[in-house]
Amino acid sequence: MAQKGKKLKSSLYRIEGDRVERLKKQCPRCGAGVFMAEHKDRFSCGKCGYTEFKRGS
């Protein structure tokens, strides 16, 4: 059973036929398999601390 606040790994991927599509943004420093957290104004990596700010509208 998943803990409160944790996401299931199956919710991070979508499988279509023989292809796997990642649904979340990945960290450019850490590479594949490390997803970035999405906040209101930025994306951030919990592993290395890399941050990308969203462009405001």
Image (cartoon, helix red, strand yellow):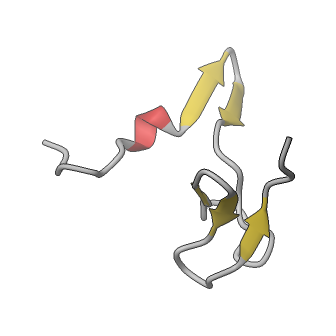
Left or right, residue 52 beside residue 17: right
Specify the quadrant that holds the C terminus: top right
Please, is residue 18 above or below residue 44 in the view? above
Furthest-front residue in this view: 57
Furthest-bottom residue in this view: 48
Where residue 37 appears, as percent x and y from the top left, is 56, 58
What residue is shown at x 71% (from left), y 51% (from top)?
25
What residue is shown at x 13% (from left), y 42% (from top)?
1
Left or right, residue 6 beside residue 4: right
What residue is shown at x 79% (from left), y 55% (from top)?
54
- Classify residue 16 by image quadrant: top right
Please, is residue 15 above or below residue 34 in the view? above
Furthest-top residue in this view: 17
Where residue 43 appears, as percent x and y from the top left, is 67, 60
Where residue 22 appears, as percent x and y from the top left, is 67, 39
Where residue 23 appears, as percent x and y from the top left, is 65, 36
What residue is shown at x 70% (from left), y 76% (from top)?
30
Report the front residue among 34 and 57: 57
Left or right, residue 49 beside residue 25: left
Left or right, residue 9 beside residue 6: right
